[in-house]
Image: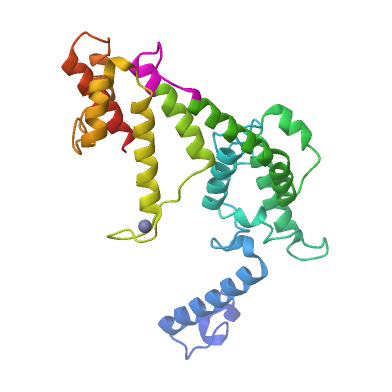
Amino acid sequence: MDANPNLSPESGGFNPTMDMRQFTAFFNQVAQIQGHINKQLNPSQDPASPYFILPSENSGIPITNVTLNGANYGAWSRAMERALKSKNKIKFIDGSIKKPESTNSIFETWERCNTYVVAWINLSLSPDISQNVLWTNIAYKLWNDLNHRYYQGDRFRVAKLYEELYALKQGDFTVTAYFAKLKTIWEELDNFRPISMCACEMKCDCGLGIIRMQRKEDRVTKFLRRLGEQYSNVKSQIMLEGLPSDFFKAEGEEEVEEVGLKPGEDKEAEASCIVLFATKLDT
Ligand SMILES: [Zn+2]
């Protein structure tokens, strides 16, 4: 039996005057226009749209390892913002994408993204806090709610850290322990009150470089001033001459532990150690 003549190219199907190359070009053009229309109709298909969700995305896996505990709002919100930015979902918390009407064609797509963001935020809350916001299921409302509740806690924590800082001195601590305590306080303060990275290319003229340098100097001074009296020689030497710029820079963390610091044992080792600690603040 003969093949169905209707399917032969000569009798129809497509224009016989159009050769294969032309057909391919035509087909690609149609596909492109179609893709463009699809993106406009359904932004969830457009990888550049905030409505786009990667197939590998999982609303059950935390996107940050910082858990909001009520006293770390600054660190938590920054970590969360970074993570959401990397997933192109920041607009769901900053209010630029609002909940659409349920009759709007985008509603289902919005709802899906919102559900992801709410789940990710909830995964990063301590159980107590999570209970408090259980019924808030719109991402930007949840974000604002958490800000109102916990941002305040931040200021008290910062004040407390400054009090601890002023009161801290070496006393009976080893230099290593004293240094570690200072560093812990400073790191937490930096989380609450970060100095932005400057974007100047060669020479800094935005002012941030100077602010950063002054903060380093203040910290070296604080570290030295509250060291025990037994280190007064090294202290005054560094205060007068400043820090050797390349001193011990290449040495690792373990080196400090190894040298240790037992007052009076080895004057030179002690001096090196103090300088090393002070230099470590300078980074
Ligand atoms: Zn700058």
Using the image, determine if residue 246 lies above or below residue 2.
Answer: above
Q: Is 89 positioned to the left or the right of 101 in the image?
A: left
Q: Position of residue 144 (x, y in %)?
A: 71, 48
107 left or right of 280?
A: right
- Residue 218, compared with residue 196, is above or below; it is above
Residue occupying the point 67% across, 29% down = 126
Nearest the camera: 22 or 87? 87
What's the residue at 23%, 24% (across, down)? 234
On the question of residue 252 being in view, the answer is no
Q: How is the image coloured?
A: rainbow
Q: What stretch is highlighted in magenta?
A: 167-179
Q: Which residue is depicted at the point 73% across and 39% down? A: 149
Q: In which quarter of the image is the N terminus?
A: bottom right
Q: Residue 61 falls in which quadrant of the image?
A: top right
Taking 172 as reference, is 129 left or right?
A: right
The residue under the point 18% across, 15% down is: 267
User: Compared with residue 86, is residue 192 higher up or lower down, i.e. above or below?
Assistant: above
